[in-house]
Image: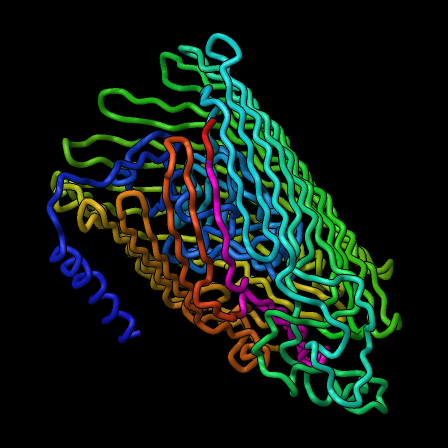
Amino acid sequence: MGDTMNNLKFTFFALPLVCFSVFSFADVELEEVVVTAQKTEKSLQDTPIAVTAVTEATIQDLNIKNVVDLQGIAPNVMLLPAPANNTGASLAIRGGVAMNPAITWEPSVGTYVDGVYMGKTQGGIWDLVDLERVEILRGPQGTLYGRNTLAGAVNFISKKPSGAGVSGAVTIGNYGLKQGRLIADYEIGQDIFAKVVLHNKSRDGFVKNNSGPYQPATQPGVIPNNINPPTKELDVIDSKGFKFSLYYAGENTQVDLSFDWTDQDNTPPHPQLGNMADWWAGALGFGPSPATGGLWVAPLHFYDRLGRDRYTSLDNEMYETSVVEGVNLIITRQTALGELKLTLADRKLDWDDQLDMDGTPHYIFHTARHTSYSSKTVELQLTGSNDFMSYVAGYYQFDDDAFTDNPQSGFLGGFAIDQKYSGGGDASAFYAQLTFDISDRTDITVGSRRTEEDKKGYASYSGFWTVDQQRSDSNTSNTFIINHQLSDTTNIYAKAADGFKAGGYNTEASNPAQAGAGYGPELIESVEFGLKGRYMDNRVSINAAFFDNEHEDMQVAYFTAEQAAASVVLNNSAEQSGFELEMVALLNDTTQFSLNYGNLDSEYTESVMAPDGFAPELFPYAPESMIYASLEKDFGNYRVRLDHSRVGEHNAFPYSSLDPRSALTHVEARNITDFRLMTSPMDNLDLTFWIKNLNDESYVVNMIPFGPGFGQLTLDFYGHPRTIGMDLYYKF
């Protein structure tokens, strides 16, 4: 920790001095970014919370086409696919995460599209098109955003129809990447605009699924077990989508109606056998001898990790499909009291997958999930201001319903179960937040939200037992912020905030006692101190935040894998503290440097014993340090940009350090560098040549450990290799 803090001090104090020393004082300055993080439009630099805004220009420059492409762009934020999924998300902010994408689990990070809550992490990864901005809010957002935002919130803000005409984009790249987007945006009547967005994406798989053994070269005397695997490639992408928007921009009334539909037909990431106990492999008859019929568990002992991100050998058909559709209606009316906004939304998800969960070419463990989910949102919100204060107040209602059928089988059909689980409920809340101008340089914000939640949970285990229960939780979450303008260029703030996540049921448990016990609500108390400033004639911005979070009954997901691929949630208390730095510097009129740094220190202050006899000790998805740096240079007709991100070592599951699985789920640090060359040969044409993972680093993103009952079977899931491509943007 001492070395980390010393490095932090050097970064915070020395780096800006280095940057300033090479300044060329041309007549350039940073553009102002306006955000709606506090439900009203306000300059990013004047918003007294830790928030990262990703503008439309940055989205295009960084080739951000998917939710996961935002990884690393904000400090202490991880946006990753869940294990064994391309469309399920693991979203972590400041160590708060829901690792399991099961439809009955609640996230710790709230995801919103145009202010509408998405509900679940399953189906939480999709292609990003036609966005105006992405706002990543760090820390509890319980007052204005409500349920399940203990760690933070991510808000995707679409561009409204404006009559901009027709534009299109085409992307081609290696691995057969083809991606297209067409936008038609017209004024169809007085103050009435209509927009149609069409998009599609296809890509070959990164990983070849060979007949066993794992790599193309066959070992002498070994008989392949899966001569013709049903799935030839993994990490295949095939998606398409459609969005229609109708916008009325009257003088006092605005109406925004939209319908969106996305269909993804993919193969999941490739599960690689990362570990298997020798005794278990021997008991199953695995080995290099032809006498075993060619049963082979390589590459564990015969191949090193090199190449595992390119080749695998699995016997079961692998697929992952996700269909998401929704209707949103937002009506805004200017009144004497302020802006009155009504939001109505109806969203649906149909999601299916089938997986080979043993990472071998043998019928050891297969599983599938068939999921349906629906949600409805109603929100009435008033925002306004007068001579001495501004205010936000509203009523919120959210209802959802979820069901999953999860058949599992293995050992040549000798093992077969069918888990069914469902959940959902009703949540309602009243909230208000007031900001008082107590002087020309100081304002105070107070806010409160009262939430009532009713939940249901159902679980069935092959008809042997069922659990059907209901519960109710309530909470009042408060926010207090004092913001002071130290000078014309520097603001400081202090924030205290509460957060709440209702309790629930362990519907994925493998025995009725665990399923029936459930778990209690999680509470968080957070303190944050921040600085936001612009210096050197608005050529440099520095935003920094210190925070300390105390979790009471933190909901920790624990993968048990007893009689099946099962999980339970344990209530443990924890504390997290850290530091975040965001800096942007215009070194001269052609060069811009950006740096993000996140430091995180996490520990459990009280742990409950897990079913395997260990108490959680390690934090998942909570690296001690994260760094993101970029350098952009303008050469006249060309712009060049280099981006480098480093994610420190961390654990993928919260196991005890005494648990053998803790070493098996340790994720090494990774360094990824991206390159972009951008040019505009015509007024209406932009071209970008890009390389992602320039250094072609082979790295593990996450794992699934099955524990001692499955012979310490562990699956590794690798990140993407080097990809190369070109984007073409054209405005007709």
Q: Residue at point 78% right, 66% down?
A: 366
In-front residue for pair 287/404: 287
x and y percentages locating residue 458 in the rendered image = 75, 50
Q: Quadrant of residue 221?
A: bottom right
Residue at coordinates 80% horizontally, 56% vertically from top-left? 460
Task: Determine whether, in the image, residue 271 is placed left or right of residue 340.
Answer: right
In the image, 60 versus 626, the foreground residue is 60
| Residue 630 relative to residue 488: left or right | right
Secondary structure mostly taken by the magenta-highlighted segment of the chain: strand
Q: Name the quarter where the N terminus is drawn.
A: bottom left
**In the image, residue 292 above or below residue 401:** below
172 or 32: which is nearer to us? 172
Which percent across, then down, holds residue 337? 36, 16
Residue 614 appears at what percent x and percent y?
Answer: 58, 77
| Residue in the image at 45% along x and 47% along y | 63
Magenta residues span 700-729
Left of 297 or right of it: where is 14? left
> Residue lying farthest front?
681
How many numbered marks are there?
0
Any part of residue 408 in sight: yes
Residue 544 in view: no
Give the residue displayed 83% in from the left and 63% down from the top. Answer: 417
Q: Vertically, is 220 above or below 365?
A: below
- Please say which color scheme the image uses: rainbow
The percent coordinates of residue 200 (x first, y second) are 61, 41
Residue 38 is inside the magenta segment: no
- Residue 335 occupies which quadrant of the picture? top left
Q: Nearer the viewer, residue 632 or 449?
A: 632
38 vs 245, left or right, is left
Give yes or no for residue 702 being in the magenta stretch. Answer: yes
